[in-house]
Image: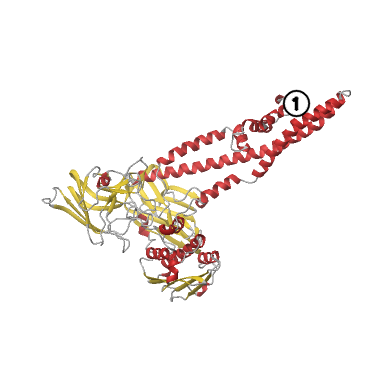
Amino acid sequence: MKRDRACRLGRGFPAPGSGLWSAPCLALCLALCGGARAASWDEALARAMTPRLGEIDGEIAAIDARLPELPAIPISDQGGTGGFAVLHLAAEPGEDMEYAVSVRWDEPAAVDFVALVPARRYTAAGLDAQFGTPDAFRVELLDAAGEPVAVVAEFDGVGSNPVRQGHPFVFELDEPVEASALRVSAQRLRVDDDMADRFVHAWAEAFVFSGQHNLAGGAAVESRTGTPPPAPWQWRNEYLVDGLTPLGLPEVPAGEHRDIGWLSAGRQRADQSARLDLDLGEVREFDAIRLFPAKRPTSDLPSGFGFPRRLNIEVREEPLPRGRVLHSARREFRNPGHNPVRIPLEPCRGRYLRIEATELWKAFEDYPAFFALSEIEVLSGEDNVAAGAKVRTPDGMGNVVATGLRFWSTASLADGFGPDGRLVPAREWLAALGVRAGLEERRHALVVEAARIHARWRQAGLAAAVVLAALGAFLAVALPIRYRVREKRELQRVRERIAGDLHDEVGSNLGSIQMFADLAEGRSGGSEELKRIQRIAAETVSAVRDIVWLLRPTGGHRIGTVEHLRETGSIMLERLDWKFHANEAAWEFELSDEASRHLFLYYREALHNILRHAKAETAEITVAVDEASFRLVVADDGCGIEAEKLSRSSTLRALRQRAEALAAEFTVESEAGQGTRLELRIPLGRH
């Protein structure tokens, strides 16, 4: 009914052709009359006046239809190495100085594709998907003398791009360039959150392709300036070209696929071997084997689940038992995480391959040892000659049902699929990730453009509403006076009629206008929709293990607080000689969910400090609960903290903030070379 009355505002008004109507006024009336089903009056107005919004919607819909066909950027930890990282004292290099890292291969080659994968780091604050990525940098190809032969790309303002969250930087050259090296030069760095007085330059992996061959694999890496961060097991120059990235396996979505890999029967000891036998169908020539790790079956297991630590490879032309070994190789591996591992071999011929794991994966003392893979490729150059090969084993469990009605089976080891999609060459996979980054950036630009159009027409609609209200007020006064002058004898009757019309028509119309004006005023102000969108994108980062634990139901389905602290310590401090003590009351004690969240973030940060900075060999954790307090002590025998550094407000800042959130007492005892002791005492009266 109110919508009909709003439409009747035109009665008694000047005709649209009289010049008294403006486009915003007409559009506002149309929005009120015909746009009632829209999300809001300002959106209806914007769509009525701006065909561009329809074009934006169509382009966004097309992008949304393409994104599921492309590989995604994983949020969870994929394991492997960290990559290359160095620290600098200033954000920008001074004169006659450069913040650069170069990758040099053996012989000049025609380069036609380059990709740089950002490093990532997990902290108590969550995932930093672009750890150490310069805010401004240049990528160049060099000749044998180290002189630039081509500028591949230049970037500025990387840190202000809200879409780039771990996406690789992908560059496909229009024409191949003969080059001997790649150089990445940083013009402006961002500060390291862990070290407020240092600026970090880091990359997870560099790829330089000539056709399908990655020239950067195992190449020489050089960085002349900067100092390495205090975590050499994670950051080394050679890790920039080791083939391990935080992006997982090179897979693209390919519809439903239920076979996720092969899993051996569990062993009690890691030295109980397991093997696989491949039949290529005919004698083939090959020079390498590529193994794809299995996907971890549960989120609390580390990446690289089931990948062997020692492996024997035998090649035969005839099957056992009469087949003579033509070629054999033994290899040892560190955990590659969720990354493929290429094993070079001397060029050889054969039909039958035996892959025997002589030392199995075993992450925890009480957890079984396994041999697990998702795919095996036998390579001749870059061609896989093992596609569709027959795989047999005496050590598997047959077809085993995994989560989501999927299966572990030997058939999946040569089907061309990983656990989440079709396996493709690294170059094709990186190119698809580059396409995804471009589409997501374009989608974000379209959303911002639409928000600006809405804001502009919201302001125009408010102005038009003011004009209409003023015009209505003028008519409410002028029309009765005009009628009274022209119709003296019928003044009273006309006055009564006008009064009734004013009450029933104009009064109701003014009420409708006031309602829409109040609604508009409530929605006015800066770029509110844009701010809301940005806030929602920022709040979608998170999957640390402790929070996942907090979200699980209480009772028999969730372990206790102290047990969780002990398990976290067992995982994070695996490399150290560490001890964990808790009194009897502590094992039965539980904090509130909010207090537990702050406690676990404090605890993980304290353990991270031991691993990153302390250079400790032993650590001791003590938990004690009494009637007055919950006490947590974390001590190590590391290098300690100098008194001058300990007095800085930035030192242990994250730990102090968590202690404040818990209303707890926080004390630090440390001397250079004497280790560090952190004590947190939470008063139980407040929790």
Label 1: how many residues lie within 10 Å, few (<14), some (14-19) or many (20+)?
A: few
Q: Closest to the observer: 152 or 513?
A: 513
Q: Please indicate whether residue 617 sits to the left or right of residue 131 in the image.
A: left
- The number of numbered discs placed on residues in the rendered structure image is 1
Closer-to-camera residue (244/115):
244
**Residue 436 seen in the figure:** yes
Residue that badge 1 annotates: 12
Which quadrant of the figure has residue 462? top right
Residue ID at (46%, 43%): 438
Q: Residue at x 23, y 62 (%)?
A: 271
Quadrant assignment, res 673: bottom left
At 67% from the left and 37% from the top, the residue drawn is 461
156 sits to left or right of 115: right
- Judge whether 501 appears above or below 308 on screen: above
Q: Secondary structure at mark 1?
A: loop
- Percent of width and height locating residue 22: 70, 31
Rendering coords of residue 386 (x, y %): 24, 45
Give the percent coordinates (x, y) of residue 28. Answer: 66, 33
Q: Position of residue 686 (x, y in %)?
A: 56, 66
